[in-house]
Image (tube, rainbow, N blue to C red):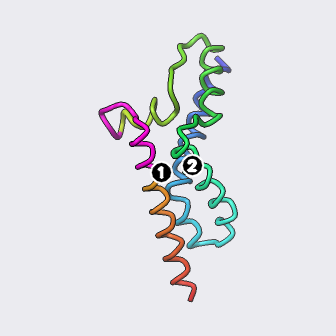
């Protein structure tokens, strides 16, 4: 039971991390200090999407699920949890690049707005 709870908590953390990558720039409007945490996460998120790598949290979650007696899954976190919610088709490398570009554009836009606001 502990492994299952740990896997579920890891999924929640992973989802929160992705939300922070995508939307964390808005926190920078309130405190510039968040940029020191947010910028590295954006770089990591975009790198994962552009390279096609699997985030290290995914195999960790899968191993916890297997230890809990559950079935693991193939592919990455985004493919398994998020893409079925957003897109009916399977995740392709092209889709990953598009997602990475969208995250990058959104965050560049947020930081440009912040720079304009601070002038």
Residue appearing at x 54%, y 64% in the figure: 25
| Residue 45 marker | 2
- The extreme left residue here reads 88
Q: Please tell me whether residue 76 is drawn above or below residue 112 in the rendered image.
A: above
Viewer-closest of 86 and 49:
49
Write down the residue under mark 1.
Answer: 100
Residue 50 lies left or right of residue 4; in this view the side is left
Expressed as whole percent of the image width and height from the top left, the position of residue 9 reads 61, 33
Element assignment for label 1: helix
Give the residue displayed 45% in from the left and 55% down from the top.
101
N-terminal of the two: label 2 or label 1?
A: 2
Q: Are marks 2 and 1 in contact (CB under 8 Å)?
A: yes
Q: Is residue 108 magenta?
A: no
Whether residue 6 is visible, yes or no, is no
On-image quarter of the N terminus: top right
Q: Residue at x 45, y 32 (%)?
A: 79
Q: Which quadrant of the figure has residue 33? A: bottom right
Say which element carries label 2: helix
Name which residue lies at 51% across and 63% down.
Answer: 107
Q: Is residue 34 visible?
A: yes
Tell me which segment is drawn in magenta.
86-99
Q: Compared with residue 50, is residue 80 higher up or lower down, i.e. above or below?
A: above
Query: Residue 49 appears at what percent x and percent y?
Result: 51, 44
């Amino acid at each position: 039971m502990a492994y299952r709870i740990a896997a579920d908590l890891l999924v929640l953390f992973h989802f929160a991390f992705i939300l922070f990558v995508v939307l964390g720039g808005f926190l920078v409007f309130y405190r510039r200090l968040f940029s020191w945490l947010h910028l590295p996460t954006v770089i990591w998120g975009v790198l994962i999407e552009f390279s096609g790598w699997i985030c290290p949290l995914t195999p960790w979650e899968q191993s916890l699920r297997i230890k809990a007696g559950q079935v693991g899954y193939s592919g990455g976190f985004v493919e398994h949890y998020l893409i079925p919610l957003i897109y009916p088709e399977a995740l392709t490398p092209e889709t990953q690049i598009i997602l990475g570009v969208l995250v990058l554009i959104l965050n560049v836009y947020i930081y440009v707005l912040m720079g304009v606001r601070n002038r």
